[in-house]
Amino acid sequence: MKAPLSSQDHPPTCCLLPGGTANAENNRQMFSRIAHRYDLLNRVMTFGRDAAWRQAAAALAAPKGCRLALDMATGTGELAFLLAGRAEQVVAVDSCPQMLSIARAKARIRPRASRFQFLLADGLRLPFAANTFDCVATAFALRNVADLGLALAEMHRVVRPGGRVVCLELTRSPFRPLAALHALYLARLIPALGRWLTSQAEAYRFLSISLSQFPDARQLAEAMRNRGFRRVGHRLYRLWPIALHVAVK
Ligand SMILES: C[S@@+](CC[C@H](N)C(=O)[O-])C[C@H]1O[C@@H](n2cnc3c(N)ncnc32)[C@H](O)[C@@H]1O
């Protein structure tokens, strides 16, 4: 099957990032520093639960018969690999070359390697025509993009009418004692783990900061409706600060 676009068809990502967004550049640099240990940290921080959350996201995003799926901000490709178990073709984009090169290396030794295409591209300016994909999924990325509204608008633009969009993301628990416990874990333990395993405490301190500035699950659902999505729903994972949103274009 012909891929929707090759990375040669558009300029390098640095040109695609919105002009002067120091945020986006800082973000890219931060992920380039932790890329080599990103998967390990995820496993350790979540006690291995992150794989099950992505599995649930992939299952929700790509029902049977899904032809072409997009993983927006794929990082090291974990969600893309799960989508490939359900969709005929998966295109995965990210703006950080170091994260992508790990995803590509992993893809080479995966079954169904021909199903993936990893592209360097900005989620805020996706290099695809409107209505290209049967589904779009993203995991742990919306907190990191420089403009949440624009990212949602782009995901809405590139999915076909009736196609699903799924967002897996950290969230603040509505149950206060649990939220306080999560805040402590994210602000204290995670940066310590980050320092120990990657020497990058700062990058992992960003996790708790970005979450404190991110909409809660209801607000994110509202933001999705405001961008034109229908049938927006979400589930919270009781003990974890995790939300899974699903919507239809
Ligand atoms: C926390 S990681 C999540 C990676 C992966 N989706 C996962 O499930 O682990 C966030 C990713 O978002 C990417 N990212 C941030 N802003 C982006 C943008 N504007 N366009 C594309 N990727 C972006 C980063 O490079 C990074 O790989």
Image (cartoon, grey):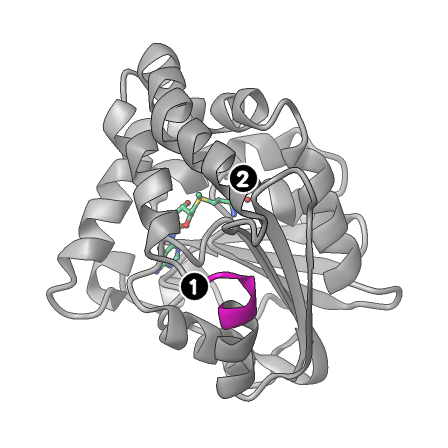
Query: Which image quarter: residue 209?
Result: top left
Mark 1 CB within 8 Å of ligand 1? no
Q: Position of residue 174 (x, y in %)?
A: 56, 54
Residues 196 and 131: in front is 196
Measured Cα–Cα span from mark 1 to mark 2: 19 Å
Residue 87 visible in image: no
Q: Does the stretch in magenta take in 241? A: no
Q: Which residue is mark 1?
A: 215
Q: Residue furthest left?
A: 20
Q: Residue at x 71, y 78 (%)?
A: 163
SS state under label 1 = loop
Residue mark closest to the camera, 1 vs 2: 2
Q: Residue at x 28, y 59 (%)?
A: 13
Q: Quadrant of the N terminus?
A: bottom right
Q: Name the main secondary structure of what is drawn in magenta.
A: helix
Mark 1 is on which residue type? Pro
Label number found at residue 177: 2
Q: How many marks?
A: 2
